Amino acid sequence: LSLVLADTGFKVIGYDKNKKVLKKISKKKSPFYEKGLERYLEENYKNNFEVSNKPVTSDVYIISVGTPLKNNNMPDLSSLKKSISEICPLLKSQDLIILRSTVPVGCTRNLVINLIEKKTKLKFGKDLFISFCPERTVEGQAIEELKRLPQIVGNYCKKSSELTQKIFSEYNSTVIDVDSLEAAELAKLIDNSYRDTIFAYSNQLSKLSEKLNLNLVDIIEKVNLGYQRNNIPKPSPGVGGPCLSKDSYILSSNFNDLKIGSENLILLSRKVNESMVYNLFLRIKKKLKLLKKNQNCKIFITGFAFKGFPETSDMRSSTTLDLLYLLKKNKFSNIWGHDYMVNSKDLKKFKIRTCSIDQGFKDADAVLIMNNHQNYADLNIYKLLKKINKPSLFLDSWQIFEPLEIEGISGVSYLSVGSNKC
């Protein structure tokens, strides 16, 4: 999505070739809007906010296109280059460009500025102004966080900083100037790679606790309790989503370019998180074999969005889809699916049978809860577990339910990430 901000009244024109997405969001019953987004669109659509299927002349251009990875895990900057090329014919003297896409350190100065100056003959710092301001919101809470979270501004020159801070100060009271484009680029990469790394710490420990027959979630809760120096996260089935699954690779590309270190902690952490799904699959496969279940046994998977909280319908880089691929590859064919946010039409694209929670549990040989959506905590899990076949497997990957109580149910073999008790 490339946003084009026009004039000092901040009328916004959103440019997205997939224009239908924004129209869907504005509908009340759509699962795609977050709290607050519907109201803002209803109040401002075709008034202060318009959607166009082509770039339009403006004074400020905000570019927020994605930076996916190539097959070699190097950043793919083709969408960014295309966006730059499309706005270049519109640029005029005194325009401001704000880049919010996640990019390698040095990209704004060495690629974006060079490309624009070459195509327009305009010079930054004199004719044009540019800042890098990382998008730091979490999916599902973006509207609230845009107002609440500090906005980081990395600028090319003093005037770039002044213009950018004026825009962000319209809705946010905390704007942080980090002095340079490169500092802001690194700030964004630090955010996500740090989180990916600390999640990997717990995920690495989970493999040890499973071998030792210890409950890591219980241990983490106790070592965190009242100990302010600890904020250790729970282990998980992996770390997915469109940001954390790739940003460590983008940061690592800078390490590679500068030939820094053969042992890259950030990259090793990413590999740990990527290994979690396969490790979980092997445990599921082993347990089903012990329970004498064949490839036609009914497997019910719930939680296809890459995360449950804050809730989202986004399945990009979902670890659940990775698990589904492994199950199908190993000839498991009777797979049922459910998600509180993803609609059935989208789930059916993966050639599984969609169902309600009740239908999923009924006569299931394995029930796999794969994300931490808050609705799971409200389930009458004991009533639902009465509906499954016996013996059966119950995977509570996030330990939403009390393990000791589930383990006490006859005929139910319990698994979770970080615990191997049955």
Image (tube, rainbow, N blue to C red):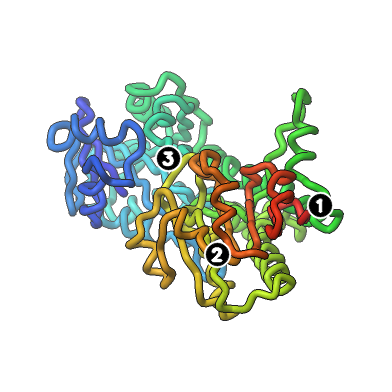
Give above or below for 306 relative to 297: above
Labelled disc at residue 72: none
- Mark 1 or mark 3, which is nearer to you? 1
According to the picture, the residue beneath numbered tag 3 turns out to be 140
Q: Nearer the viewer, residue 39 or 189?
A: 39
Mark 1 surroundings within 10 Å by alpha-carbon count, few (fewer than 14), some (14 through 19), many (20 or more): some
Q: Which of 41 and 373 is in front in this view?
A: 373
Q: Is residue 141 left or right of residue 363?
A: left
Lower position in the chain sequence, tag 1 or tag 3: 3
Mark 2 surroundings within 10 Å by alpha-carbon count, few (fewer than 14), some (14 through 19), many (20 or more): many
Lower position in the chain sequence, tag 2 or tag 3: 3
Amino acid found under the numbered disc labelled 2: Ala
Q: Nearer the viewer, residue 203 or 264?
A: 203
Lower position in the chain sequence, tag 2 or tag 1: 1
According to the picture, the residue beneath numbered tag 2 turns out to be 364
Check disc 1 and report its element: helix, strand or loop.
helix
For the residues bearing labels 2 and 3, Cβ distance under 8 angstroms: no
Q: Residue 416's x, y, as percent?
A: 69, 53
Q: Nearer the viewer, residue 231 or 250?
A: 231
- Mark 2 or mark 3, which is nearer to you? 2
Give above or below for 364 relative to 408: below
Disc 2 to disc 1, C-alpha distance? 28 Å
